[in-house]
């Protein structure tokens, strides 16, 4: 199944770029306290741990899981499958997501955390597929902007598999 996978980003390139993102994030937060880093399961697990280890800022870590479904009028909706445990009211939230595609997940999460009275919400994504955007959402930090290809590895899955491939690959159909 993964034999035809081509390399998009090698492990070293991923780590180098994450190091740069960590630096940007650190420069912004400085020694601020009351920062809650929220990782979007399952895809962002790999990115989250590498990013956090490279950061000098010391946030609280929490996780959230979303799921997409078709709502009424056949529009795609995002629901919360596993919620955060932390009280984020009055706190600065940094959402860590693997990829922004249509933008629906991150739009939903921005609204969701804003309703929980977060003081500020920022978003960091490892990958961005700008061609695929359907809804408008502001992302603060982007690792790599990529063409419209389906990626697998480094947390990205196809039907739940391939997340533990150490590099980011794609299928060239
Ligand atoms: P969005 O809500 O459409 O922006 O979708 C975001 C979610 O779609 C991500 O969290 C991923 O789980 C998934 N996704 C989008 N593109 C890819 C891909 O190329 N490979 C694997 N998962 C993807
Ligand atoms: Mg995801």
Image (cartoon, helix red, strand yellow):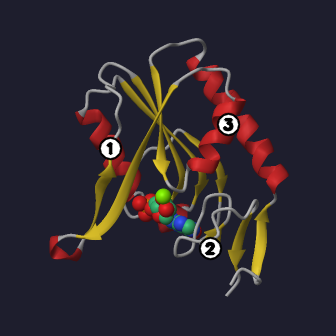
Tell me where residue 124 sits by quadrant: top right
Where disc 2 sits, the SS reads loop
Q: Is mark 2 within 8 Å of ligand 1?
A: yes
Provide residue 97's location: percent of width, then percent of height.
52, 48
In this picture, is 119 found above or below 140?
Answer: above
Which residue position holds label 2? 149
Q: Nearer the viewer, mark 1 or mark 2?
A: 1
Give left or right: position of 115 versus 61: left
Provide residue 13's location: percent of width, then percent of height.
81, 51
Which residue is situated farthest in the bottom direction here? 173
Residue placed at 53% from the left, 13% from the top?
A: 32
Residue placed at 28% from the left, 42% from the top?
A: 112
Let me know if residue 29 appears in the view.
yes
Q: What whole-number distance in Å separates the C-alpha atoms at marks 2 and 3?
A: 23 Å
Give the quarter of the figure containing the C terminus: bottom right
Q: Residues within 10 Å of mark 1 (few under 14, many from 20)?
A: few
Tell me where residue 150 sits by quadrant: bottom right
Q: What whole-number distance in Å separates the C-alpha atoms at marks 3 and 1?
A: 26 Å
In this picture, is 18 found above or below 161?
Answer: above
Let me know if residue 101 appears in the view.
no
The residue lying toward the viewer, choosing from 36 and 23, is 36
Numbered tag placed on residue 31 in the rendering: none
Earlier sequence position, callout 3 versus callout 1: 3
Q: Nearer the viewer, mark 3 or mark 1?
A: 1
Where disc 1 sits, the SS reads loop
Numbered tag placed on residue 83 in the rendering: 1
């Amino acid at each position: 199944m993964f034999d035809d996978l081509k390399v998009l980003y090698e492990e070293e390139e991923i780590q180098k770029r994450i190091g740069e993102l960590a630096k940007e994030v650190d420069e912004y937060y400085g020694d601020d306290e009351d920062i809650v880093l929220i990782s979007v399961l399952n895809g962002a697990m790999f990115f989250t741990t590498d990013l956090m280890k490279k950061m000098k800022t010391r946030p609280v870590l929490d996780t959230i899981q979303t799921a997409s479904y078709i709502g009424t009028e056949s529009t795609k909706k995002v629901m919360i499958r596993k919620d955060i445990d932390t009280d984020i009211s009055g706190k600065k939230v940094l959402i860590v997501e693997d990829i922004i595609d249509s933008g629906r997940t991150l739009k939903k999460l921005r609204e969701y955390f804003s309703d929980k009275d977060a003081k500020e919400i920022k978003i960091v994504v490892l990958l961005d597929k700008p061609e695929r955007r359907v809804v408008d959402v502001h992302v603060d930090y982007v690792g790599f902007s990529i063409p419209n290809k389906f990626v697998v590895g480094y947390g990205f899955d196809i039907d739940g598999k391939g997340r533990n491939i150490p590099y980011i690959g794609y299928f060239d159909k």
